[in-house]
Image: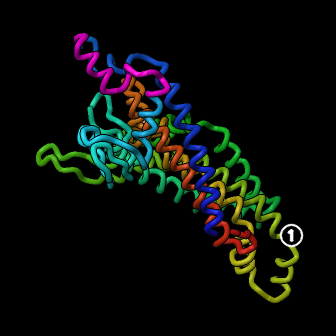
């Protein structure tokens, strides 16, 4: 188990290293960051100071080294840099210190906040939306997949497969527009649901935030349709293969009820490909469902990233991409661990 984790972490580090290289050189090719920070009214002296602060007066390869040093959890910084950047961690040494720190994703051009702070403010909304969407997709998808497999070649099987094909084929942004229009506009008097809204509202009198989970329904439903469709098809095909195995016939021969055979024996052995889909899709949703969050006005990482792109706030976009890549790596490692727990046939050594 330990060797597997080390191997997966090593692969994950290589993936993240590739993402860092691509992200840095793509966004370095667009615009003048100093001009984006100051706008069109900045004087030349201030522009030079900003370029020096952002290392823009250095060659590209040095800029890249400084960027890697900033985003790495292990870095070398001077006392002044630690104070100026607001680095948090454990540092040792003299004037130049080496330490373990929270990665510094730099500061937003627009708000001057640390990018980490901007993403952490949006993270609760994304977690809430991703969990709600995956809960809906898992419960309904596995149920429909089992039903389609057990009732093979009946109208229930055909209907489940047909619905899942439509769900996979329709893009999320298109479904978001359709669902928002139908349930948030046409049927608003019956559903009480709004076209847009985040997970909190602010009281105009007291200024306090309060939860409005009603706004979660439409984006979660929209976001859950595609993973639901994939989970349905994977569950169905995997269950059909498992139900034809000899140990299933043996279980029936022992007098076990159909419900116990399907749930305790067949589903447990058929769950691995479904688990892969669940972890993969959850990682994608957690990293940020850009169009869905933007269309429904849901305050999450996806909406923050799209807003940052509109304003050319590249540090926020770069930080969001790195955050998404990290989530995918961690979720893949988590999926490998779950394989060994759910299916003892999978060797973890």
Question: Which percent across, then down, holds residue 70?
Answer: 39, 39
Q: Name the quadrant containing residue 197.
A: top left
Question: Which percent across, then down, holds residue 133?
Answer: 51, 53
Q: Main secondary structure of the magenta part?
A: helix
User: Circle 1 sits on which residue?
Assistant: 244
Residue at image position (56%, 55%) is: 331
Question: Which percent across, then down, holds residue 207?
Answer: 15, 46
Q: Is residue 11 above or below residue 46?
A: below
Left or right: where 223 falls relative to 233: left
Q: Nearer the viewer, residue 92 or 343?
A: 92
Q: Nearer the viewer, residue 31 or 267?
A: 31
Residue at image position (66%, 57%) is: 276
Q: Is residue 230 visible?
A: yes
Please report the bounds of the magenta region as a residue range.
Answer: 43-62
Q: Name the quadrant containing residue 303.
A: top left
Specify few, some or many for label 1: CA neighbours under 10 Å numbering under 14, 14-19, or 20 or more: few
Q: Is residue 331 magenta?
A: no
Q: Nearer the viewer, residue 19 or 78?
A: 78
Left or right: where 299 falls relative to 131: left
Display colour scheme:
rainbow
As helix, strand or loop, the secondary structure at mark 1 comes to loop
Q: Quadrant of the C terminus?
A: bottom right
Residue at image position (31%, 50%) is: 93
């Amino acid at each position: 188990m330990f060797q597997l984790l080390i191997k997966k972490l090593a692969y994950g580090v290589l993936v993240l290293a590739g993402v860092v290289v691509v992200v840095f050189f793509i966004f370095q090719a667009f615009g003048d960051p100093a001009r984006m920070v100051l706008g069109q009214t900045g004087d030349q002296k201030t522009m030079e100071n900003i370029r020096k602060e952002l290392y823009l007066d250095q060659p590209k390869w040095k800029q890249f080294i400084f960027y890697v040093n900033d985003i790495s959890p292990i870095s070398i910084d001077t006392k002044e840099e630690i104070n100026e950047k607001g680095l948090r961690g454990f540092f040792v040494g003299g004037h130049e210190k080496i330490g373990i720190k929270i990665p510094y994703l730099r500061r937003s051009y627009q708000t001057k906040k640390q990018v980490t702070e901007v993403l952490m403010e949006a993270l609760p909304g994304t977690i809430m939306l991703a969990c709600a969407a995956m809960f809906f997709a898992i419960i309904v998808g596995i149920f429909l997949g089992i039903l389609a497999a057990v009732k093979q070649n009946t109208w229930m099987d055909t209907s489940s497969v047909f619905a899942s094909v439509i769900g996979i084929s329709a893009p999320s942004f298109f479904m978001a527009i359709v669902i928002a229009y139908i349930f948030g506009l046409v049927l608003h008097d019956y559903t009480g649901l709004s076209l847009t809204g985040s997970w909190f509202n602010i009281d105009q009198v007291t200024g306090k935030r309060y939860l409005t989970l009603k706004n979660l329904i439409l984006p979660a439903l929209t976001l859950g349709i595609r993973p639901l469709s994939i989970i349905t098809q994977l569950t169905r095909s995997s269950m059909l293969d498992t139900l034809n195995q000899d140990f299933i016939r043996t279980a029936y021969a022992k007098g076990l009820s159909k419900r116990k055979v399907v749930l305790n024996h067949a589903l447990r052995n058929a769950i691995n490909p479904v688990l892969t889909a669940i972890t993969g899709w959850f990682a994608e949703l957690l990293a940020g469902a850009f169009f869905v969050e933007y269309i429904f006005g849901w305050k999450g990482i996806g909406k923050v990233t799209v807003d940052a792109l509109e304003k050319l706030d590249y540090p926020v976009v770069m930080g969001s991409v790195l955050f998404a890549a990290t989530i995918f790596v961690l979720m893949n490692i988590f999926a490998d661990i779950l394989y060994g727990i759910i299916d003892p046939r999978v060797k973890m050594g």
